[in-house]
Amino acid sequence: MTTLTYRNRRSEAVGGNDRHTEKENEEQSGNLDGQVEEDKEDSKHLRLTLMEEILLLGLKDKEGYTSFWNDCISSGLRGCILIELAFRGRIHLEPATLRKKKMLDRKVLLKSDAPTGDVLLDEALKHIKATSPPENVQSWIEFLTGETWNPLKLHYQLRNVRERLAKNLVEKGILTTEKQNFLLFDMTTHPVTNTTEKQRLVKRLQDSLLERWVNDAHRMDRRLLALIVLANASDVLENIFSNLPDDKYEVAVTRSRELLDSNPDEEGNKNVGTEMIWAVLAAFNQS
């Protein structure tokens, strides 16, 4: 699993039916409150998928490409796809049992095969629907990335994911398309043109760890929690903190590390609404 890159000068420093319904509402209250606030905010801005947001965080603004040394973002984007499908009610994990308490012991099950309107999500959903017996989250990340030793699963690989996501962001007016010459070859790049959207995304993530810190993963907005987990898995989490002053940087890094060091098996069984996030974290902890 990838880790945060710490700056050298900084030290490494979060009625029966009625009662049943009330309990479920109480468990989800933190997420719902944050989700309502986020939905109000997003109504004024472009709505991006988790995959698009992680790619945007990883892109260099002027150069328009991700770091050549980042070999984690491909698998991170596949984790995004699984969590996005779960958020949209298309997949879920099988229920926990005495013998299947660990997140990676629980298989990914189809909940609905209704199209999402997103080509990448629908392509992954089609593969999940066609797979029997079902597989766990770690296996699906490997299948969708193409990093599997099983030749029968190689056709599950999603191809040209970064380029397809960049094209979506170009259509949404956030990126543009250019050609750059790198001595021996030409490469298509996608510089950021709408820096306001990227700055807003970075600010939301910073605030979730600073001014709006709730000190409880289950009270956090689940989308922000997912982005922190996925940004770390994609090795782009440092990009969120790079413009912070030293004192806030230390606080944000420490709190994000508290979240990432949580036990996924314990946290994932507390709230069904975030179980896919913790399963993805467990998968990257194993890698």
Image (cartoon, grey):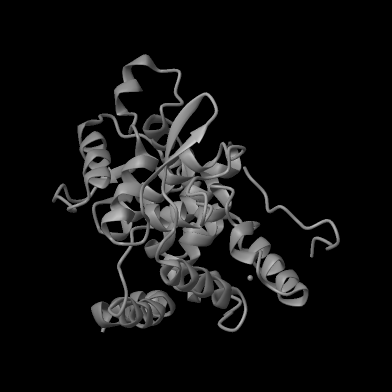
Q: Is residue 157 toward the left or the right of residue 200 in the image?
A: left
Q: Quadrant of residue 273?
A: bottom left
Percent across and percent down for residue 184 are 52, 23
In this view, 93 is above or below 40: above
Q: Which one is nearer the viewer's eye here, 53 or 193?
A: 193
Residue at x-position 64% and y-position 58%: 238
The count of marks equals: 0
Outermost residue on the left side: it is 114
Residue at x-position 27% and y-position 43%: 120
Residue 277 visible to the viewer: yes
In this view, 125 is above or below 150: below
Residue at x-position 57% and y-position 80%: 214
In this view, 136 is above or below 33: above
Q: Which one is nearer the viewer's eye here, 52 or 102?
A: 52
Residue 94 visible to the viewer: no
Q: In the picture, which quadrant includes the C terminus?
A: top right
Percent across and percent down for residue 115 are 15, 50
Percent across and percent down for residue 60 are 54, 53
Percent across and percent down for residue 21 are 29, 78
Residue at x-position 23% and y-position 52%: 90
In this view, 63 is above or below 193: above
Q: Is residue 89 toward the left or the right of residue 247 in the image?
A: left
Q: In the picture, which quadrant includes the N terminus?
A: top right
